[in-house]
Image: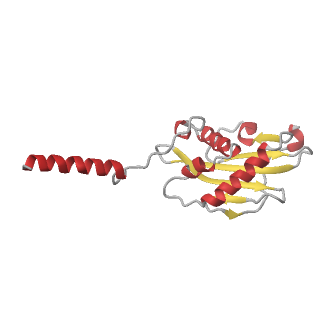
Amino acid sequence: MNKLGFWLFAGILLAVLATSCGGEGKEAKKMVIEDLPFNKAESAKEYADLVLKAIKTSREKPLKDEFGPETAVNIVQLNRIVSMYSSGIGGRKDWDFHDFHELSKSTDQSQGFDYAWLDQKGRLGIQIFIKPAHDGKAYHIESMDFRSRLDVMESVTFPTGESIENYKKINYDWVEKK
């Protein structure tokens, strides 16, 4: 084999290896799910609503990926909690859903977003708090809190997966708004 043939072969081999191994320094591509277009969210609120949709439809894998590559998330714990809350939210058609950002007509999207479900008697049953962050390119999940006043559901924060108090005070006049 002459020198030109050797270098051509070596170049092709290196290109194939770099492509198959993902290459050094390249960002990993995120899977894009058609009904969860996280990468197309134009605001923190739009992004948080997509995260909530993923929770409601019990899809923890896309949620885990939204924490970013440097964030350690216990996927087993996330799977369990998302499944638990998805069942709790989806299984109760008679509960009232409240999106506090929408209700307050707030324009501040920097503090995160509270969502809550009230039981038939108007008592707070489940709360989910989603705090997105923007890295200059796209949104990602900074934190998520799952809170429940139901004994059968744990209250947990992510990305750590640690237990938290099952109550968060939300300034909202429940009686006035009924």
Question: Viewer-proximal residue, 104 or 15?
Answer: 15
Q: Is residue 167 left or right of residue 72?
A: right
Quarter placement of the C terminus: top right
Question: Viewer-proximal residue, 58 or 147?
Answer: 58
Residue at image coords 69%, 50%? 129
Q: Position of residue 37 (x, y in %)?
A: 56, 37
Q: Is residue 96 left or right of residue 12?
A: right
Residue at image coords 61%, 37%? 46
Q: Position of residue 57 (x, y in %)?
A: 69, 43
Count of numbered labels shown in the rendering: 0
Question: Which quarter of the picture shows residue 38?
Answer: top right
- The coloring applied to the image is secondary structure
Question: Viewer-proximal residue, 147 or 94?
Answer: 94
Give the vertical position of 2 relative to 101 (above or below): below
Give the vertical position of 15 relative to 33 (above or below): below
Q: Position of residue 2 (x, y in %)?
A: 7, 49
Residue lying at the far bottom of the rendered structure: 162
Residue lying at the far left of the rendered structure: 2
Question: Which quarter of the picture shows residue 50?
Answer: top right
Q: Position of residue 72 (x, y in %)?
A: 54, 61
Residue lying at the far front of the rendered structure: 1
Residue at image coords 71%, 40%? 101
Residue at image coords 60%, 35%? 35
